[in-house]
Amino acid sequence: MKTTGETIRSSRFRMEREGDWLRLQGILDQAERRGMKSLAFEDARDLVTLYRQAVNALSVAREISLDSAIVTYLESLSARAYLLVYAPRASVRGGVSRFFLAGAPLAFRRSGLELVIAFALMVLGGVAAFALIRTDPTWFYAFVPEGLAAGRGPQASADALRRVIYDSEPGALDQLGAFATYLFSHNTRVAIFSFVLGIIACIPSALLMLYNGSIIGALAAIYVEKDLGLDLFAWLSIHGVTELSAIAVATAGGFRLGRAVLFPAEKTRKAALSDAAHDAVKLAVLAALMLLAAGLLEGFARQLITAPMWRIVIGWGIGALWFTWLLGAGRQEGAIRNRPAVDASTDNAFPESAS
Amino acid sequence: MKNEVAVEKSGVARGKRRARTHRKAAGRILSITPPEGVPFDLNIASFYARAGAQIIDIIITVVASLLVLMAVGLTGSVDFQTAQAIASLIFLFIGTPYYIIAELLANGRTPGKKLLGIRAVAVEGSGLSVHQIIVRNLLKEIEIFTPILLLLTASPDNLLVPLLALIWLIVVIIFPAFTTHSQRIGDLIAGTTVIAAPSAALLPDLASTAATQARERFVFTPAQMDLYGAYELQVLESLLRGERNEMNRPRFSDVTMRICKKIGYEEAIRPHEEEEFLQAFYIAQRGYLEQKKLFGDARADKHYGASGVDAG
């Protein structure tokens, strides 16, 4: 029995299609090296057709060809083309504007319950610490770590306490330094941990919120005792409104993850978690932005503006802006319809949490 | 795209159908089924490639951060603590956005990954989404960079936190060894993994390059070609595709001798004809087996059929 190269089916199969494969390979080489935009019109137009042909050829080659070189080559070629054809189409600018116009506000409103709980825990911690220290000032040391207290304590004089609030204007670079140190300070860490640890059934996040609230309550207690309550309120307001909201937002993100772990409903825990992650990640990014804004306010604005009235007005004004954005943006019908699919329970919770 | 399935197989335990057709190096394999419905296998990137790419990316971001830091430093002198805080702040701002934007723009390839030929992909067989890119890189911040920064703060009177950070770092680094797709924690949550970018060249067809003379010189009967299957054919193919040098000569004569003995080829093959003989046999055998396969008679290897005793 005689078999020549021309009569072998796999050779004929290869000869008929080789040109198209090599063309596709050339297009892929160019696109991988210099990006899709560098492709000529004909190449970009034919890319998908050539990809489908290559995938078809792979499927046929696996059946009829015993030439492993063809199968290996086609597998690699199809995989490369697949990764190019099914590449993410989103642009960076589109992603950013979508986040601001719809992503973040909608995620915020879908997490209404978690946000309320986070704020409530913080207030609860604050009130408890305040009440405890009013009855026995030594409780202060139980709540506030030494580094954070920085000389502020029950024994500190009213003058010393006042100096912390109205310290003199440092130079520009010192402000930058203050800003930088701030961002790696206590509160950023609390935000990160309460987001991440939310996954452990919400408990560590809840404790962190209580604790964070208690620190503020403790500070409030000693300042109120020295009749500096309003000054402290103004001092905290200018950045604290944004900052504490950021911590609450991060914690709400953690709670979303924890809720998916605790109550996955009819889904598997993994599926529930990856669904909840869509909103939780948006909340984390939002919290990061808010912390950044709070850092700028604390590093610069708080040093420049010393009048209590202005501190309060600016702090709460900026807070109001955040909430206007988060509660108002993304209300168009289209934007709501285009959001990623989430489970039915959060869909139903959405109108109530918006209020 | 919802009903796609991703099947993961380790390099050792593979489906029976394709067990012989793939002889890739042992390593983890991600099998993706694109919307077109034809699955293909991708090699998962090795730990070393990933670590290398990460180190290159860290070098790029650190150098960029240092340049910015120097620019800040030129505006005035600051004490060490503040400088440290500013440095870590700059690193934070250059770090995560760098990874997210690079992976978005280059479809899952940061400069470091591009250099080492690896890329991030979604495990389900759809394209990488923006959400996945953000999740895997945000978590990288928590998984890798925060512990590294904490490690740098180590001092004799502050050992507990750096120690915890070190333990966490070790857990994060060995974590991928225990997940099916070699995913780190961020990959697992985002539903992504990192693969070696496929790059196979189109090798020449052995059946068309062989000398015509050889095909006419050596003729085989169907009975002689009934003895081998696809596996042996592909072993022969890899031998023929190997480098032609003096090292391979003994292997050619060894294989020629074995084949002649097995199929009962009477004519003696002279040493300089061995390669031609093997080529001719390869072409004849491939044509014969492909024809058999066309009629539903696929032969995986020489143990094909009831005669399981034959083990020559």
Image: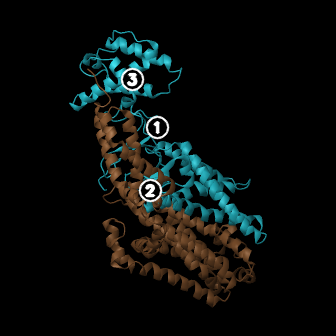
Specify the label residue B279 is tagged with.
Answer: 3
Residue located at (43% from left, 28% from top) = B238
Kindly indicate the quadrant of the structure image that contains residue A346: bottom left
The residue tagged with tag 3: helix, strand or loop? helix
Q: Nearer the viewer, mark 1 or mark 3?
A: 3
* Mark 1 closeness class: few <14, some 14–19, many ≥20 residues within 10 Å: some
**Identity, as a three-letter code, of the amino acid under mark 2:** Ala
> Residue A228 placed where, x, y %?
66, 85
Separation of residues labelled 3 and 2 (CA atoms): 50 Å
Q: Which residue is mark 2?
A: B190
- Seen in the picture, residue A237 relative to A282 is either above or below; the reply is below
Residue located at (60% from left, 69% from top) = A187
Q: Which chain's colour is brown? A: A
Q: Nearer the viewer, mark 3 or mark 2?
A: 3
Look at chain B in the picture and name its colour.
cyan
Separation of residues labelled 2 and 1 (CA atoms): 22 Å
Q: Which residue is mark 1?
A: B27
Q: Nearer the viewer, residue A86 or B159?
A: A86
Residue located at (44% from left, 49% from top) = A26
The answer to the question of whether label 2 and label 1 lie on touching residues, with beta carbons closer than 8 A, is no
> Residue A329 placed where, x, y %?
42, 79
> Residue B239 placed where, x, y %?
44, 25
